[in-house]
Amino acid sequence: MVVSCIKRLPIVNTSPQGGLFHRLFLTLRNKVKVQSGNTVNIASTTRIRQCHISIKGKGNTLTVDDGANLRGVQIELNGNNCSLTIGKYSVIGEGCYLSARENGTTLSIGENCMFSRNVKVMTSDGHDILCANKRINPAKSITIGSRVWLADSSVILKGCCIGSDSIVGIGSIVTKSIPKQCIAAGNPARIIKNNIHWQEELTY
């Protein structure tokens, strides 16, 4: 049984150099399905539990950096040569869905980010939309800077970049890029405040 769990991870690297215990620990606490020809880099100081990790295709890379904290998150890479990176000390809440799909797309999350519950970040629409027999909705990469706070049930769609220190409000749908140090909210999200800075501590 132990051997079958480890075989689900064709290449698992840890930082530094990692080992058998960390591979086993990851697969026992999470549902992990990784096809051969893909790479998973999990730093040894991460906390990952009750997550679903699915990687299909070839040449895909999942990286979760030091101190990241994930619980009940669904992570999907489906395609070829896609990458999904979660930066140091970022917290990804329960019910979040992170998806890098198709060919050559990148989903990059910076350091010290905070994603509340049920956030969705997707590089693809999931289905082709055709006009005159040509596809008009190709996948696009997503970049989220450091110290970005995504509030409950916010959605980040393909091609968006969110600058560092920004906030996306509850239930917002981001369809265009957002600069640094601002608050964006609504459907579609629009900037409602600039030159802000947020902190995890709540003072009252």
Image (cartoon, rainbow, N blue to C red):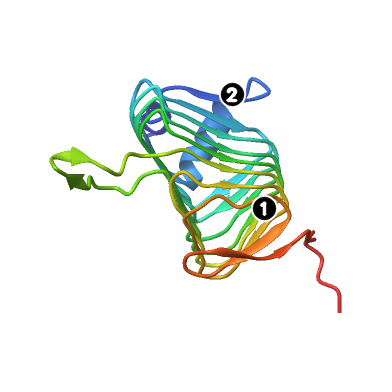
Q: Element under label 1?
A: loop
Pinpoint residue 169: horizontal percent, then vertical percent.
60, 68
**Rendering coords of residue 115 (x, y %):** 60, 57
Say which of marks 2 and 1 sits in front.
Answer: 1
Seen from this angle, which residue lies furthest bottom? 204
Q: Nearer the viewer, residue 146 or 174?
A: 174
Separation (CA) of disc 2 from disc 1 = 32 Å
The image quarter containing residue 55 is top left
- Could you say where residue 180 lies in the image, as x and y percent from the top left? 70, 50
Is 174 on the left or on the right of 147, as rendered?
Answer: left
Q: Residue 77: give x, y in percent of width and height.
A: 39, 37
Task: Return the disc, 2 or 1, that comes first in the chain's sequence.
Answer: 2
Instruction: Name the residue rendered at 70%, 42% in the picture.
Output: 111
Residue 97 vertical placement versus 103 (above, below)? below
Crowding around mark 2 (Cα neighbors within 10 Å: few <14, some 14 to 19, many 20+) is: few
Asked whether, in this view, residue 98 is left or right of residue 146, the answer is left
Quadrant for the N terminus, please.
top left
Disc 1 marks which residue? 148
Of 92 and 31, the residue lying toward us: 92
Q: Residues within 10 Å of mark 1 (few under 14, many from 20)?
A: many
Q: Quadrant of residue 123?
A: top left
Q: Amino acid at mark 1?
A: Val
Report the front residue among 29 and 121.
121
Label 2 sits on residue: 19
Residue appearing at x 50%, y 56% in the figure? 72
Q: Quadrant of residue 196?
A: bottom right
Amino acid type at image mark 2: Gly
Relative to residue 128, is residue 94 depicted above or below? Answer: below
